Image (spheres, rainbow, N blue to C red):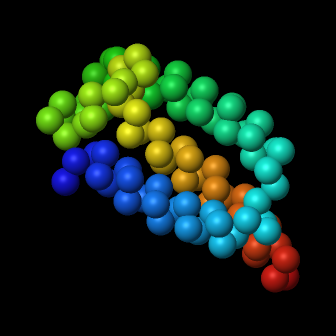
Amino acid sequence: MTYLLLTASVLGIFSVYGFLMRKWLPVRPLLGAAVVMLTLTLVFDNVIIGTGIVDYDPEKISGIRLGFAPIEDFAYTLVALVLVPSLFNFLRSKL
């Protein structure tokens, strides 16, 4: 399985999840958090990949990179940006 296929699958599932949980997702703070988190992901992924701590099989990535980081690596940040605040607000409303 390629990272792109895995990323598409995960983002597809979390797109549906994000749509269903949209009531618990504050849009304006989420956009600000997205800018910060994606920037941090870009910086630190480039550091850990550039120093050789982590490496990706070139046969399994799309080939699109931002610096050293393959574009697929940003999917985890996008999932966290949707999952964390929606679960926090959902669980807070249940207590």
Residue at x-position 43% and y-position 21%: 66
Using the rendered view, name the quadrant where residue 70 is placed. top left
Nearest the eye: 22 or 49: 22
Residue at x-position 58% and y-position 68%: 17
The answer to whether residue 48 shows anywhere in this view is no
Nearest the eye: 70 or 50: 70
Up the image or down, 78 lies above or below 18; here it is above
The answer to whether residue 15 shows anywhere in this view is yes
Q: Is residue 61 left or right of residue 14?
A: left
Q: Position of residue 41 (x, y in %)?
A: 53, 31
Q: Position of residue 40 (x, y in %)?
A: 59, 28
Q: Is residue 6 left or right of residue 35?
A: left
Residue at x-position 63% and y-position 36%: 37
Up the image or down, 52 lies above or below 20; here it is above
Which residue is situated farthest in the bottom direction here?
94
Q: Is residue 57 left or right of residue 38?
A: left
Q: Position of residue 2 (x, y in %)?
A: 22, 48
Residue at x-position 19% and y-position 54%: 1
- Total labels: the figure holds 0
Using the rendered view, name the quadrant where residue 26 is placed. bottom right
Image quadrant in which the C terminus is located: bottom right
Q: Position of residue 25 (x, y in %)?
A: 76, 60
